[in-house]
Amino acid sequence: MAVHLAPPGSLATGVGSLPHTDPGKACDDVISIFPQLPYAPSLPNRGLLENIVFCDSERLPGRAIREGRLLVDREADLSGEMEQVYLDYMEGNYSPYAVSAEYASGFYEFKNRSFNSPFSLKCQVTGPVTFGMQVVDAGKRPLYYDSQYADVLSKLIALRARWLEQALTGITGGTNTLVMVNEPYLAALGSSVVPIDMDTVRSGWHDIADLLHGSIGIHCCSNTDWNFIFSLDPGVVSFDAYATTKEFLLYRDDLFTYLERGGVVAWGVVPADNRVFSGETPESLYERYMGIRKEVTAYIPEKLFDAQSIITPSCGIRFATETESCKIMETAAMISARVRGKSNS
């Protein structure tokens, strides 16, 4: 059963993807900039298989890739493959769900690195809602609308997440781990255009959380029903604080309760889009974060806010150069250093 992350005390980290094509350089940059909370970068520019959804599709029953699209062929009998996922989940048999290097070169490089007593090690998987809404069958129906397949999918991702977690634990022999579930499609919660059943979301979330031993978080870079997200009790809630703090703080009572029970918020205050980032300065983004901090600490203790916060870019950084991506990450690290210096003074 997943546990809450120890208080990170306003450390900084990244979210997921980077524009790099060299896994070694990507990990060098991440570990240099975020030594206390490094993350295994995703490198989608290396090829299709390292893109979101594709990167976690190796064991997907009925998987087919056609014209650059990930599909499921339902014409074949998939019952045996689906039953195997159920059996492996019940037995906790996660070894067959290991990540191959061609799907996650950044993770493979990361797990072979040495670390100097980090606070935690972080990685990410595609969430079942996002996965199930992007992948369709031959009739172009999203998998998530098939209740049986949605159930299998959450267990498949849980096994994948457990393998990733165990690989991170093996690096340092017990350091805290954080597996983030990447769920941009949760922005559709409450939508009549893209209906998503909340009971299915909750069940799938618990399938993953129940199999993990470390901490689990959720990243949604658009506005959503944050009350529902808090109710899932993730260890970390990660969001685009640069663009959606106003909407996020409409749930301030739920936020306060969440922080009090040990939850952590990753404030994505640094724009991941370099076109937006280039219109800011490190100082303007620091002041923006301090403005958020001031607004929130008007109704919760400063010590609680600082203890239960992480500072990040707003999302994964893909559409930037390597140099630009480093500047974005370095700005998050700079804000963290200043906040930590202030809170410890």
Image (cartoon, rainbow, N blue to C red):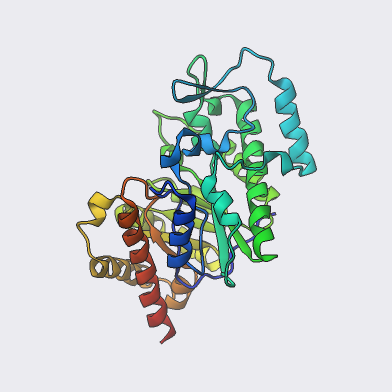
Q: Is residue 61 positioned above or below 328 on the image?
A: above
The x and y percentages for residue 56 are 57, 38
Q: Residue furthest top?
A: 75
Q: State the residue in front, 20 or 303.
A: 20
Please tell me which residue is depicted at 50% across the width and 35% down the height of the picture: 49
Q: Which residue is drawn at 23% across and 50% down?
A: 275
153 shown above or below 139: below
Position in image of residue 143 (x %, y %): 55, 26
Q: How many dots with numbers? A: 0
Q: What x and y, as percent, mark residue 24? A: 49, 54
| Quadrant the N terminus occupies | bottom right
Extreme residue toward the bottom, this view: 345
**Is 146 above or below relative to 100?**
above
Horizontal and vertical percent position of residue 9: 49, 73
Q: Can residue 168 be seen in this view?
A: yes
| Residue farthest along the right direction in this orientation | 91
Q: In the picture, which quadrant includes the C terminus? A: bottom left
Decide if residue 197 is in sight here.
Answer: no
Q: In the drawing, does residue 276 fall left or right of residue 55?
A: left
Q: Quadrant of residue 72?
A: top right
Task: State which quadrant residue 110 falls in.
Answer: bottom right
Q: Quadrant of residue 217?
A: bottom right
Q: In this view, does 31 lie to the left or right of 93?
A: left
User: For the point 39% across and 71% down, which residue is it?
Assistant: 336
**7 up-or-down from 15: above or below:** below
